[in-house]
Amino acid sequence: MTTVLLVHAVPLWRASLACLLSTDPRIRVRTSDKGGLRGCMAESPADVLVADLECPHSMEVLTFMESLSPAAAHSPALVVLARGDRAGDLRRAGDAGATGYVDKLGPVDNLAAVVHKVADGGRHIDESLAFGLLRATDVPLSPRELRVLALAAEGESVSSIANALHLASGTVRNYLAAAIRKTGARNRMDAIRLSRDFGWL
């Protein structure tokens, strides 16, 4: 039996994906929304985490995976639902250790098979996402610069970003300046626009 923790903030999509996975009798599915991931994993660790990278708060899943020690007794595999034109999302998933990449705009009939494959230690990349993964290596911004820019894109101030990431305000300004320089943007808003156009945010 493969245990899956499906994390999604949208109730309808969460229920639909859980129903799809539950059609396989060898998969036991639990679900979580925003903020419930760590509690669910502490209560009963899952073999596989499944997350939609376009879902609000999917960063929680990636942050959780990055926080795990390589020596941890039980580290779940990560399957992400993604789009090929969102290179930044694919890069962040790769940095977090994702081993399963499913095209969310493609057929849905292989999701259970992908879950079993990564649970057994394998890797899966939908063919339609392969080019996007290659492009993901070309993202000029570091993960930290992307995170700071993403929070700025949500309208957060420098001080609130600093508090959220446990950084000094000057450090946040340096990250924003680096993002503007590396994207060739005129200002912060232009850097956000360009990063979104390229699928990095």
Image: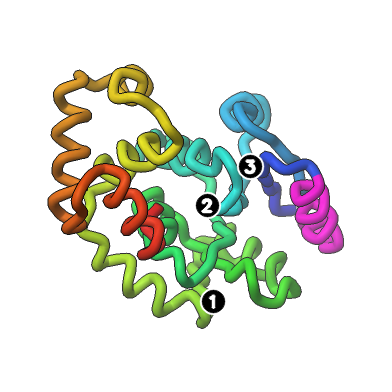
Colour setup of the view: rainbow
Quarter of image, res 33: top right
Determine the CA span between mark 3 and mark 1: 23 Å
Q: Which residue is the site of mark 3?
A: 46
Please state the horizontal and vertical placement of residue 41, each as a whole percent of the image: 61, 32
Along the line of sight, the residue nearer the viewer: 19 or 163: 163
Foreground: disc 3 or disc 1: 1
Please state the horizontal and vertical placement of residue 105, each as a whole percent of the image: 64, 71
Give the side of residue 164 with respect to residue 186, left or right: right
Q: Which residue is the site of mark 2?
A: 77
Three-letter residue code for mark 2: Ala
Along the line of sight, the residue nearer the viewer: 163 or 112: 163
Q: Residue 184: say if magenta.
A: no
Is residue 48 visible in the rendered image? The answer is: no
Element assignment for label 2: strand
User: Considering only vertical position in the picture, is 88 above or below 55?
Assistant: below
Q: Residue at x 84, y 55 (%)?
A: 19
Q: Main secondary structure of the magenta part?
A: helix
Determine the CA span between mark 1 and mark 2: 17 Å
Q: Which residue is the site of mark 1?
A: 126
